[in-house]
Image (cartoon, coloured by chain):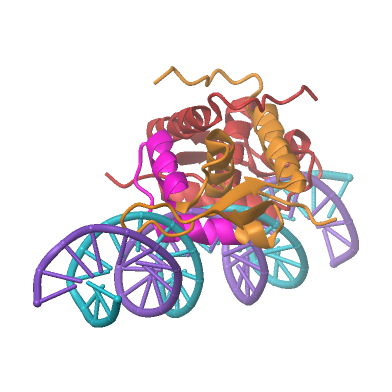
Chain colours: A orange, B red, C purple, D cyan
Amino acid sequence: MGRNTLGTLEQAVMMVILALGDGAYGVAIRDELSRRTRREHTLGAVYTTLDRLSAKELLESYLGEPTPTRGGRAKRYFKLTGEGRQALDHAVNTRHELEYGLGLAGKGA
Amino acid sequence: MGRNTLGTLEQAVMMVILALGDGAYGVAIRDELSRRTRREHTLGAVYTTLDRLSAKELLESYLGEPTPTRGGRAKRYFKLTGEGRQALDHAVNTRHELEYGLGLAGKGA
DNA sequence: CATCAGATTTACATTGTAGAAGAAATAGGG
DNA sequence: CCCTATTTCTTCTACAATGTAAATCTGATG
């Protein structure tokens, strides 16, 4: 059972997917990621990450219907797999374990 | 002003240094990191990270006295710089921003 | 001088990031 | 209708930064 370590961006992308629920496709993910992160991200960066997470079977995807808007082609939606959810939970737990006792709670936005 | 993004391990190491206060030198950092992370880390991995963070001036180091124990040579102690502290706080805030609203609080150890 | 604690080096795997190129859809003029 | 310009979304390619392990180096001590 390979240890599934997650990078910073990988975790971020997974969290954004959770936040978006249905409706988590490339562009939306990129936008929400940039918003929450207060920093621009390119689509290429996002898709590369999505692909890698999919390859590790931490994400799965399915195609939606084309939308009737100018250029609106079929979107590929992403969601966490059980394994993905587990890996993310683990990462979050580890982080809490690390933060424990230090006084570095973030002052709200 | 270069964006100072921190990797997962970089953040972890910085947090461990905070946790150790004085007494944060290579071996101790490695051990505490392994403990909090529930996972073994090699010294090489740790020192590489320490070096890189130092190069980015997020950490600074100073030499202590040799200890009178078998083979106990002078240790190199590490601490966060102001910039380092800032970068870590920023990383933590970003993470909270990402976690916000999702129900993935870690169940305690 | 054998051995131990600690540090450094080296090499390679995995992630992060950007930019360019590709593909499917629709609007509108002819 | 039917081209094709344009919009939206995806894929590919290439390179930079981080993660990780193993071997080597150093200075101390018994």
In the picture shown, does residue A62 fall above or below B15?
Answer: below
Q: Nearer the viewer, residue B13 or B38?
A: B38
The answer to whether one can see residue B67 in this image is no
Left or right of residue B96: residue B44: right
Left or right of residue D21: residue D13: left
Q: Nearer the viewer, residue A53 or B42?
A: A53
Q: Residue at x 39, y 43 (%)?
A: A31
Whole-percent x, y for residue B86 in the image:
40, 31
Magenta-colored span: A27-51
Would residue B65 be counted in the magenta stretch?
A: no
Left or right of residue B39: residue B101: left
Left or right of residue B2: residue A29: right
Q: Nearer the viewer, residue B55 or C19?
A: C19
Q: Residue at x 51, y 61 (%)?
A: A48
Q: Quadrant of the C terminus of chain B?
A: top right
In the picture, residue A22 is in which quadrant? Answer: top right
In the picture, residue D26 is in which quadrant? Answer: bottom right
Q: Residue at x 41, y 48 (%)?
A: B56
Q: Quadrant of the N terminus of chain B?
A: top left
Whole-percent x, y for residue D3 in the image:
24, 82
The answer to whether one can see residue B36 in this image is yes
Whole-percent x, y for residue A87 in the image:
72, 44
Dominant SS in magenta: helix
